[in-house]
Amino acid sequence: MGFEPAVADPVEAAAAPPAALPQSAAALASVIAGPALILTEVELAQREKGMRLVMEGAGDFAIIRLDPNGLIVHWDEGAEQLVQYSASDVIGRHFELFYTEGDRLGGLPERALADSLAIGRHHIEHWFVSKNGGGFWASNVFMPMSDASGKLIGFAKIVRNISKRREEDAALTRAKEDAEAAARIADLLAAELQAANKELREANDSLQRFTSIVAHDLRAPLRRVETLVQFLMEDYAQALDVEGKDIMSRLDSGVVRIRRMLTSLLDYSKCSRGATQGKTAQLSSIVDAALMDLDLDMIDIDLSIDLGPVGDVAGDDQLLSHVIHNLVSNALKFRRRGSRPAIRIDARSLSPEQIEVAVSDNGIGIEPRFAERVFDMLYRLHNDDEYEGTGIGLSVCRKIVRDHGGQIWIDPEFEGGTRVVFTLLKPSEQPGNFSADDEPVTPMDAL
């Protein structure tokens, strides 16, 4: 019988059904497999020699022969290298010495021999105890051997060190479990975030509608108050003393401030998600419309505009014009007293999908610690005695920019004034390519 020089896995080959074996493994199995091997001592020695040639090509294997009682009668060099016992250490001893105490008490050695007699072979993986208390995970195949008369003469036992494979399998299992756990956590977090966003969006929509209704309904009674104040100031001015006139002037200023605030709230409530979808606008036209409303030709101002090669942007021209209008208005409002205002509007392309627009001035500036808070609804850095305002303008700008798929911020490195920067998408990236659902909803989006 011929043998090939190597086999992928002699232990598994010996344990496999004969029909499933490759040629080399079938050759090995033909040596030691089958419910009753008809072997003479000479044949057995010859076949063991051939089998060792197969094993040498595979590595990490040992061939051990046992007598019918399980005592070790043959111990080759491969077994000595693998288990660290010499032949003199183990010949005549029961093979149960390779089992842990728990496995011996569990009857694993006896079961191995009994099963191999019953079904022709027995395969088991267990912790194989080597010399000096060490050990390794081993794959073991037991097969009975008979002589020409059919008498049982012992057992062949093939041992393979599978510690590395077990470690790799365990690592793979842990990695798979970790990946599955991470995926479950990610799915859970995504579901929670989606639910939270949906809930918050619904609350925002309700609050936005409420804000619009309140701001609209308050304008009628406010107009009556404003009319009465004007009537008193014009028709009863002679009857008022200095203190009375001061009170009426303050009342008139308060009415004007409330009217501005209501107008800003209405503007804010009209900025709805989805209003920008499917629209494009030319940036130069947006800037022109914003500046036209400000009548800058009536103001002594140093204005420079550099939009570079930026052409169309994705979004609503009126809403984006409102952003430019608000930022330039703030630049005029918060100018340094006694200085000529200098305002610059510039734009540049950041990528094939995005542009950046900036409005800078030489005004009083914003301290870095307030750079985030100035975008909060109703937050003001100055009172009306210093600079009039409602604390809503920058919140409106942020909402419009976010609804266009961009971001807005105060440039912290700009010196000598304020520089407000915001990004917009180019038409190829506009909604439906951008959805408001792509960003988490914040409570400030609601008003």
Image: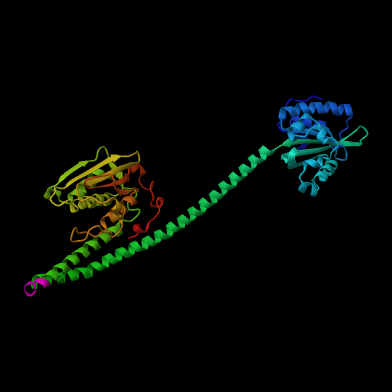
Q: Foreground: 275 or 290?
A: 290
Residue 437 lies, with reference to residue 18, above or below; the image says below
Q: For this view, does 284 lie left or right of residue 10?
A: left
Quadrant in which the N terminus appears = top right
Task: Tell me the quarter of the picture where residue 13 sits.
Answer: top right
Quadrant in which the C terminus appears = bottom left
Residue at left 25%, top 68%? 218
Q: Which residues are magenta?
A: 237-244
- Estimate the x, y position of residue 158 in percent, counting from the top left: 78, 35
**Residue 293 in sight here:** no
Q: For this view, does 175 lie left or right of residue 53?
A: left
Residue 15 lies, with reference to residue 191, above or below; the image says above
Q: Residue furthest bottom?
A: 239
Q: For this view, does 16 lie left or right of residue 232?
A: right
- Estimate the x, y position of residue 156 in percent, counting from the top left: 82, 35
Task: Tell me the quarter of the picture where residue 144 sits.
Answer: top right
- Estimate the x, y position of residue 342 in percent, counting from the top left: 17, 45
**Residue 259 in sight here:** yes
Q: How many marks?
A: 0
Q: Residue furthest front?
A: 132
Q: Residue furthest left?
A: 238
Residue 265 forms part of the magenta stretch:
no
Q: Main secondary structure of the magenta part?
A: helix
Residue at left 23%, top 67%? 219
- Estimate the x, y position of residue 225 in percent, counting from the top left: 18, 71
